[in-house]
Amino acid sequence: MKTRIHVTLKPGVLDPQGKAIHHALEGLGFGGVNDVRAGKLIELDLADDTSDADLDAMCRRLLANTVIENYRIEKL
Amino acid sequence: MKAAVLVFPGSNCDRDLAVAIEQVGGTRPAMVWHGDSTLPDGLDLIAVPGGFSYGDYLRSGAMAARSPVMRAVIEAADRGVPVLGVCNGFQILTEAGLLPGALMRNAGLNFVCRDVPLTIDNAQTLFTSRYDQGESILLPVAHHDGNYAADEDTLDRLEGEGRVALRYAAPINGSARAIAGIVNEAGNVLGMMPHPERRIEAAHGGTDGRRMFEALLERVAA
């Protein structure tokens, strides 16, 4: 079972990396970029019987730091 | 003083910490590998060193915080054993849940490596008792992820409870409320980004870090 975990910074948490990317896009002449937020994509290949509870625990206990990050689970 | 210094793959301040502890305390600390699930008995100090444990994979300190030795560190911290986390050690302690908040990429995106002036915000912690309240000291920093972040309630609580041990005298990395080091609720765990172990003898250019180890030693002797 292929699963993607999208890890993103919580709203309001400063994202210096996103800001730098934003600057670089502007430097390339792209106008109209209002904001950039950078995150992580983690792909898991899981046994079919992996429970949702386990998957959620993986996110909470390691894959995302819930102090500063949100996560979204996408099953493919 | 019976101390242990943790060693993770990618730690690079473990030996500096060990030298500082031995110079001040007179006894060579035990070097404990991250894969060990137990710590020596009767420790007076557990030191979590700086460096780039696990190559900062996932997040700084994230992998190290889940290593076997950290379970033993959490148990020891719960029993009141003093724990000092420096730089990557601070990141590891927040990732392990021993300290609140998180350390994010420096606001300027630059790796900051220089001596910085700090203010002792609480001179009554186990670790800062040999400094004066409000004293200005100089310690080196060398980090990319030192931008302390926590929600406003947590920051208010840290300040209200006197748990901000050190602050940057001037902003260097975007850290919330200029926080450079905090203690846990019980006061026996300190995480800080600056490196006290790199300023303990005159040859280092100053000795402002030395008193942190002296304070810990004094506590053992008392």
Image (cartoon, grey):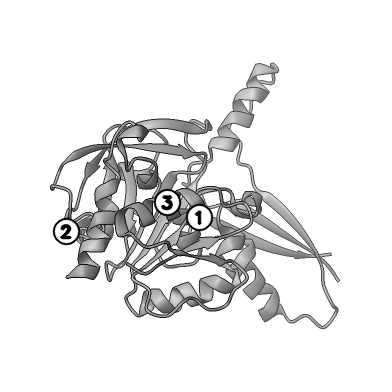
Q: Quadrant of residue A57?
A: bottom right
Q: Is residue B159 visible?
A: yes
User: On the rendered structure, is B171 left or right of A40?
Assistant: left
The residue identified by callout 3 is B19
Residue B16's spot in the image, x, y percent?
46, 48
Q: Alpha-carbon distance for marks 3 and 2?
A: 25 Å
Residue at 60% across / 24% down in the picture? A23
Instruction: Name the image quarter holding residue A31.
Output: top right
* B114 is higher (above) or lower (below) than B101: above
Query: Dot 1 surroundings within 10 Å: few (below 14), some, or many (20 or more)?
Result: many
| Pointers 3 and 2 in contact (C-beta within 8 Å) | no
Disc 3 or disc 2, which is closer to the eye?
A: 3
Q: Between residues B220 and A60, which one lies in front from this camera angle?
A: B220
Q: Amino acid at mark 1?
A: Ile
Q: Which mark is residue A68?
A: 1
Q: CA distance from mark 1 to mark 2?
A: 30 Å
Question: For the residues tagged 1 and 3, is the chain the same?
Answer: no
What percent of the width, then of the height, locates residue B126? 23, 62
Give the numbered dot on residue B124: 2
